Image (cartoon, rainbow, N blue to C red):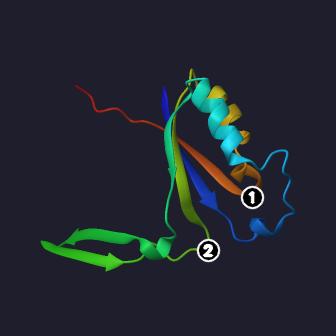
Amino acid sequence: MKYMMLIVSDPEAADRPSDPAVDQVEDWVAKHDSSGKRLMGQRLHPPESATTIRRRGGELLVTDGPFTESREWIAGFDILECEDLDEAIAIASSHPMSAAGAVELRPYWPYES
């Protein structure tokens, strides 16, 4: 099953002391790339660079900035291929941002044929 792993920045948790033994995202990426569980991923620019698109009443609304006003923001994503949610949780919980922010897992919702 495929999972989208959203990496969420939490400004309040960012003040915690760094632990080089677990904070190396490059090590996490290399480990899960080589296992075949991480299919892809990427960091994202900060929310100020977002463009939000809405259609309302037949009108196209394009807004600079994020959809919501929030202290937390999505900082990146990864796509995982896992046997089940337990395996996805084990992988996500080892990501450095699980200690400095949050990691949200969402299973893919495939289109019905």
Q: Secondary structure at mark 2?
A: loop
Q: Nearer the viewer, residue 76 or 103?
A: 76
**Is any atom of residue 53 visible in this view?**
yes
> In the rendered image, which residue does mark 2 sit on?
71
Q: Residue at x 81, y 69 (%)?
A: 15
Inter-mark Cα distance, 1 to 2: 14 Å
Q: Quadrant of the C terminus?
A: top left
Q: Is residue 78 left or right of residue 103?
A: left
Q: Amino acid at mark 2?
A: Arg
Q: Secondary structure at mark 1?
A: helix
Q: Is residue 76 left or right of residue 54?
A: right
The number of numbered discs placed on residues in the rendered structure image is 2
> In the rendered image, which residue does mark 1 sit on?
100
Q: Residue at x 49, y 71 (%)?
A: 47
Q: Residue at x 49, y 65 (%)?
A: 45
Q: Is residue 79 left or right of residue 7?
A: left
Residue 64 image point, x, y percent: 36, 79
